[in-house]
Amino acid sequence: MAMLLTFLIALPLLAACFIALLEAKHRRIIEWAVMVTGGVELVLALALVPAVLTDGRVEASALFSLDALGAFVSLLIALVGCFASVYSVGYLRAESAKEIVGPSRVRQYFLLLKLFFFAMFLAVATMSPVVMWIAIEATTLSTAFLISFYNKQSATEAAWKYLILNSLGLLLSLLGTLLFLALPELREGSLTWSGLRACASTMAPLIVQIVSVFVLVGDGTQIGFVPLHSWKPDTYSKAPTPIAALLSSVLLNVAFLAVLRFKGLTDTAIGSGFSSELLMLFGTLSIAVAALLIFVQKNYKRLLAYSSIEHAGLMALGFGFGGVGTLAALLHMLYHSLGKALVFFVAGNAFLKYGTTKMHQVTGMLRSLPVSGPIFFVVLLALLGLPPFGLFTTKFLMLSAGMETAPYVVGGVLVALSVIFFGFLRHAHAMLFGATPENVTVGEQNALTVWPVALLLCLFFVLSWYLPTPLSELVEMAVTSLSLTR
């Protein structure tokens, strides 16, 4: 199993090296390499789950090990990544047919995409906070070039904004990490998460509180907590749609993993109250601001960016409430990853069809996109938390957990969620049911932009009703590991 973990980490890097050695004219080979490696990564992530359930973790070396929480996040990366890889091929084929991108740009896209996956798997599988910080910074660097993929001035500005804000945030996170590692209690200890946890109870409470603020603000920038969210709408609206989907669905989870690792240290050192209050503060603020700004959006990709901010806030509340809220937050992470990737893929199909992200120019999707249009409507309802999808259950459980500890917070969040509900329906009505423009033909772009969407919707629906036993046990084990410090 150690070899499987090593291969899971190394495979995206090997694929990137393979693509780098190929000329741009070998496009079909590059596309197949991306899709096949995406499928193999999913198989490897699935194969590691039984070993984690049996032994508690899979160790490849002293620095690389996968526990239940890491296995859960890596599974989400591999699952969404597999669908995103296939969808990216179809998406770029459609853009190439319109002469928007050429073979060299396609090769560059897939090369950076595999480096992005390598950095995420590395961040999840490492037991070193320093290596994790390096890997998360690597995700920022690789995606910055993908955001500016179209070489437009607005895209370049969005990439610089993303790079500067996230790098500044990660510098704060690095400062917090180094403060932890500089504590006298660790001078003879292991600089891994387990070593830090073993020494946490003897750490100075004031230093731990300062470190917690630095880390939450730093990694919270990449999550997109308000007031550190300003890069998200610009980035999501200008990046290629598959990249926006990955940023919203899986990179957010990697940043959350870093926050949860440090939260465990903080809770061991000074109890869960301090970090929980910080998470509730950022979560409530994020949901409230997202609710206000969703109403005035005119770009549907920016609209989805504020939806990501809302859901990040909900997960922060769940982890802050604790208890059943932790379980609900992890399940919310699963359903949000699938649902947000799905809605971005459909938004990408709308962009390929209409050639714009302005909502007033996108009308009649139910007729012009006979597959993507209805799916867009269904997934929007799911993201708003309506049954029978899993996000309804997770929202209900998180808010129920909050009623015991912070009922006034829950009351305010319910008001904000009501505003978000009506704001989304207000925007979606014209996009779905309006008249189709005369210059827009009826039909989807190609099979590779439809099949990933349809299959992902089926998976989303099935998992909302039934969690396979290994996945359910993995989530329970991850919840237990997060609850040990309470």
Image: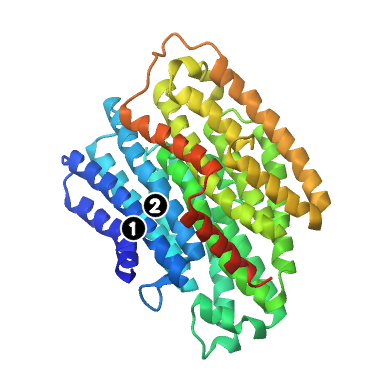
Query: For numbered disc 2, what is the local secondary structure?
Result: helix
Residue 406, visible in the rendered structure: yes
Q: CA distance from mark 2 to mark 1?
A: 9 Å
Image quarter where the N terminus lies is bottom left
Instruction: Note whether 382 is above or below 39 in the view shown.
Output: above
Disc on the earlier residue, 2 or 1: 1
Residue 31 is left or right of residue 227, and the answer is left
Camera-side residue: 138 or 160? 138
Question: In the image, which disc is placed on residue 78?
Answer: 2
Across and down, in percent, residue 408 comes to 83, 50
Q: How is the image coloured?
A: rainbow
Q: Which residue extends farthest right? A: 408
Label 1 neighbour load within 10 Å: few <14, some 14-19, many 20+: some
Across and down, in percent, residue 439 comes to 41, 11
Instruction: Note whether 67 is above or below 404 in the view shown.
Output: below
Across and down, in percent, residue 326 comes to 64, 58
Q: What kind of residue is marked 2?
A: Ala
Q: Which residue appears at 40% of the width and 35% of the height?
A: 455
Camera-side residue: 257 or 476? 476
Residue 164, visible in the rendered structure: no
Q: Which residue appears at 47% of the width and 11% of the height?
A: 437
Across and down, in percent, residue 24 comes to 19, 42
Closer to viewer: mark 2 or mark 1: 1
Camera-side residue: 153 or 104? 104
Camera-side residue: 339 or 434? 339
Q: What kind of residue is marked 1?
A: Leu
Q: Which residue appears at 54% of the width and 58% of the height?
A: 475
Q: Which residue extends farthest front? A: 469
Residue 173 quadrant: bottom right
Disc 2 vs disc 1: Cβ atoms closer than 8 Å?
yes
Question: In the image, which disc is placed on residue 44?
Answer: 1
